[in-house]
Amino acid sequence: MRFADIQEAHDFLAANPEVRSIELFLIDANGVPRGKLLHREELLAVFESGRPLPSTILGLTINGEDVDETGLVWDVGDADCWTFPLPGSLCLQPWRDRPTGQLQVSMHPTLGLPATPADPRHLLARVIDGLKGDGYHPVMAVELEFYLLDHERAADGRPLPARQMNGTRPHATQVYGIFELEQLQPFLDDLYDACEAQGLPARTAISEYAPGQVEITLEHRFDALQAIDEGIRYKRLVKGVANRHGLQACFMAKPFADLAGTGMHMHVSLADAVGNNLYASEDPAGTPLLRHSIGGMMATLLDSLALFCPNANSFRRFQANSYAPLAKSWGINNRTVSLRVPGGPAKSRHIEHRICGADANPYLAAAAILAGIHHGIRLQLDPGAPIEGNGYAQATEFLPTDWLTALRALEHSSWAREALGEDFLKVFLAIKQAEYRQFMGEVGEQDWRWYLTQA
């Protein structure tokens, strides 16, 4: 694990004398940024000797509650665990009213104990190192969809798509609509400006398959860890810029029952040490290495599903003819499958992993994808023939559509224990099992509507 040099802090403070506060954060198991707001005078000490954060910060539910079963609460006395800054993460948050810095940290391999094994970034770094040890350098890009919503709600509590510049709410899908993007120009202009200020490679924007749904792609990176770091910071940025405009950027997997879900597509290929694409081939199906990679991802798909779809709501996204995957399938230039090999020139050959909801933690999703790829390469797994035509109609081996089945598959997976580690799984499963119990124990509007008078 490489941490930032203190010269970054000196340069930042010299270039930004007006900054008085710096948001320090790390990413927990749910992908939620958690941390502290530091004063300017505290920054150099973080680079010199790290910053302690409580062990419980990596053992929280999505609602920010301790989970004793993680072993990170009373068993260790909520111990201080030392974090250190990540290179290149110190930057401005342009959406703030007052100039404010931003700094991402990660647990130190030893000084961060006992919380270090629960740090999602450490898990991804370890999986990447395993691939590199066998001569494979993963190249990745993150493609995130989100809904842009108003803070106000409908009378029944339903979220509402954000009003456009002309004062109206979008009501039609208008996928790839140019007018819809034009109506978002003030938000998009600020978003691209903020990405440029933070060095994030935001590229194409499109109006997605629902009113108020947007997708912006990020450039692929030879350094897969850098690509996922950028995906994490991009998500934080989108929420910040939206809030500045009085809006809410929603990455929930399925916020509307009757509209498209929100996905996170992960693009991956393998390169050699100097960057040559090892999937490159004039054959649209790619090289044997590409197909072994797909075979590994298919073989470990069920075991990984709780990382790709980590919440109860995640599974509402799996509906036929919705551009969300339903089955263990792959195909060439086909958006009805889970694992897609896009078209294009030979040198660009790669795999688009289409299973994750936008609510997934990018570090954990990428770790599971790459560990699956490594598994397939080692065992030279054959994915079978690619699907041609409508993959929904041809599906035979369906993905589970409930949270508990996915959690149990991860819990009982010998592959996951070896690839992801017992210590990480103990913490992650404890968090998710606690969330499951709490979610299932909550009585709400749907229960009353269905059963209050009829049962």
Image (cartoon, rainbow, N blue to C red):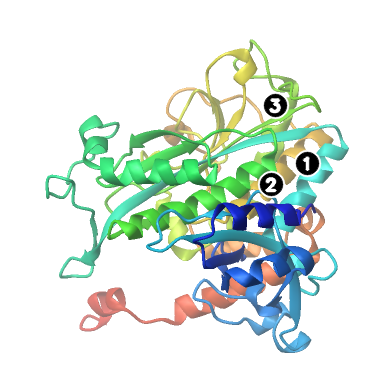
Q: Name the residue under label 1.
A: 375
Circles 2 and 3 in contact, beta carbons < 8 Å: no
**Left or right for 178, reference 140:** left
Q: Mark 3 points at which residue?
A: 290
What amino acid is at disc 1? Answer: His
> What is the residue that sits farthest to the top in this orientation?
282
What amino acid is at disc 3? Answer: Leu
Residue visible at 52% across and 68% down in the picture: 21
**Disc 3 crowd, CA 10 A, few/some/many (<14, 14-19, 20+):** many
Q: Where is residue 141 in the image (x, y as percent from the top left)?
A: 58, 37
**Mark 1: secondary structure:** helix
Q: Mark 2 points at which residue?
A: 300
**Left or right for 442, reference 118:** left
**Image quadrant where one finds the N terminus:** bottom right
Residue visible at 59% across and 75% down in the picture: 60
Please say whether residue 3 is visible from this viewpoint: yes
Q: Distance between the residues labelled 2 and 3?
A: 16 Å
**Left or right for 398, reference 281:** left
Circles 1 and 2 in contact, beta carbons < 8 Å: yes
Q: Distance between the residues labelled 1 and 3?
A: 12 Å
Q: Distance between the residues labelled 1 and 2?
A: 8 Å
363, above or below 221, in the image: below
**Left or right for 305, reference 244:** right
102, above or below 70, in the image: above
Towards the viewer: 316 or 18: 18
**Mark 3: secondary structure:** helix
**Disc 1 crowd, CA 10 A, few/some/many (<14, 14-19, 20+):** many
Instruction: Indicate which disc, 2 or 3, sits on the residue closer to the N terminus.
Output: 3
What amino acid is at disc 2? Answer: Thr
Residue visible at 76% across and 53% down in the picture: 5
Towards the viewer: 142 or 423: 142
**Image quadrant where one finds the C terminus:** bottom left
